[in-house]
Amino acid sequence: MRILNENHKGFSTILALALIPLSGFATDIYLPSLPAMANDLHVSAAAVQFSLVVFMFSVGVSQFFIGSILDSFGRYKISLASLAIFSATSFVIALVPNIYVIYAMRIVQGITIALIVVGKRAYFVDLFSGDKLKNYISLFSIIWACAPIMAPFLGGYLQSSFGWKSNFYFLGILSLIFFFLELIYSGESLKHYQPFKLKSIVQTYTGMLKTADFTLGLIIIGICFGIVVVYSLSSPFIIERVLGYSAITTGYSSLLSGFSLMTGGIIAKSLIKKPLGQKVGIAFGIQIVLVLLMIFTSSLGSSLYTLLGFIIGIHIAGGFIFNIIYGYCLTRFSKNAGVASGLTGGVMYMISSVFSYGFANLFEVKTQLLLGAADLSLLLIVTMMFIIFNSYRRKSQDLGI
């Protein structure tokens, strides 16, 4: 086993941070291409949207098992193999443009992305502790938000210049570059291997999921991310087909959405010492007010500018909430970092994929009004979840558990 070289620790840490947004890149880069893919593959909008959902669900389900595997067998070799497979499947999607092949490859990609991202999140728990670890964890959602900023923006230009397949060629080349950088500069970070005993693993998972504040926190971040994904799924069709703009405009709008998420995360980091219940409660209130305004003003006539104006505010508040609750869940069980990381990411992706695809199609989101209705429904659910979560969180703090 190749142990991480101390001289390479700095660059290896940068690589680990750079790989955290890879899941977002795999999700968001081809968002501006969804209408073009539907036309080229002769399938419905829902069919191409489903390629994103099966990927997210695959990422989510995989992370239930991956945390314990990484805690038992290490991070490094698994990460290398996953990067190689992800690269190969990206090229297959570009070379074999068939919707069912795309579904199959996206499922495989979901598994590989889960292995990479969970391993890299656990990498920081392996090597750092105390305030330094908290600082890195608070950076995770900020860095992760880089993908919704950069990926659709880049994808819009790739779509406009070379077509939708170029997005997957780009993903294949990018992951191949990361593979070689990891091969040269990285190494194994895990110092204490956990025995792979199925019974004890099941007990660990069960114990975590029975912890009410942890499980409710996972539901909250899943729905918060689902609100963002509803916009990601519907915006290409609203902007390109209803409002008549190009894929590049979709990319710019997604850039603003991603920048808003990052801004929310930065604000959360700056207010890290403020009481959790108070600051998150205020953020939910802001989101609800903005969504209600988005619904009421849609009767006056919606445009790209009104749509984006409300989305920016809603996503800033969403990024703020996500950063805080995500960090809470990741640090809830520090002795089982891999499992906690896997559960946190896994449940989040599963919940967000189900809620986002379900509500986007339930409301058949094609206008600002319908987007607002879908968002409001999700916000009412997640606000109730937060009230219950906050009650259990205070109880666990009072009991010191």
Image (cartoon, rainbow, N blue to C red):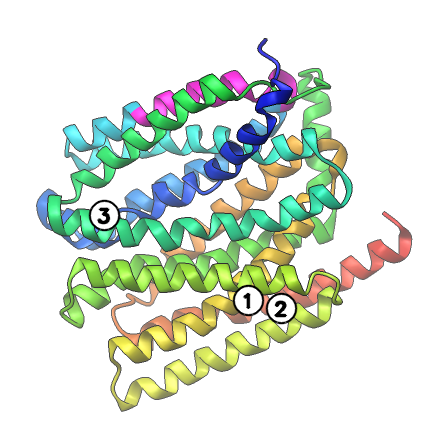
Dots 1 and 3: beta carbons under 8 Å? no
Tell me the number on the disc at residue 47: 3
Q: The magenta stretch spans which residues? A: 71-87
Dots 1 and 2: beta carbons under 8 Å? yes
User: Which residue of the protein is positioned furthest toward the front in this rendering?
Assistant: 7
- At x 74% / y 40%, what residue is drawn? 333
- Using residue 93 as the reference point, say whether residue 347 is left or right of it: right
Q: According to the image, label 2 marks what residue? A: 384
Q: Is residue 38 visible?
A: no
Question: Which amino acid, by three-letter code, is at mark 2?
Answer: Met
Instruction: Please state the horizontal and vertical placement of residue 367, each as a whole percent of the image.
Output: 26, 73
Please tell me whether mark 3 sits on a helix, a strand or a loop.
helix
Q: Nearer the viewer, residue 44 or 348?
A: 348
Local packing at callout 3 (Cα closer than 10 Å; few below 14, some 14-19, many 20+) is some
> In the picture shown, does residue 115 fall above or below 137?
above
Question: Which amino acid, by three-letter code, is at mark 3?
Answer: Ala
Q: Quadrant of the N terminus?
A: top right
- At x 66% / y 37%, what residue is drawn? 340
Q: Earlier in the sequence, mark 2 or mark 3?
A: 3
Please tell me whether mark 2 sits on a helix, a strand or a loop.
helix
- Using residue 6 as the reference point, say whether residue 179 is left or right of it: left
Q: Is residue 140 visible?
A: yes
Q: Earlier in the sequence, mark 1 or mark 3?
A: 3
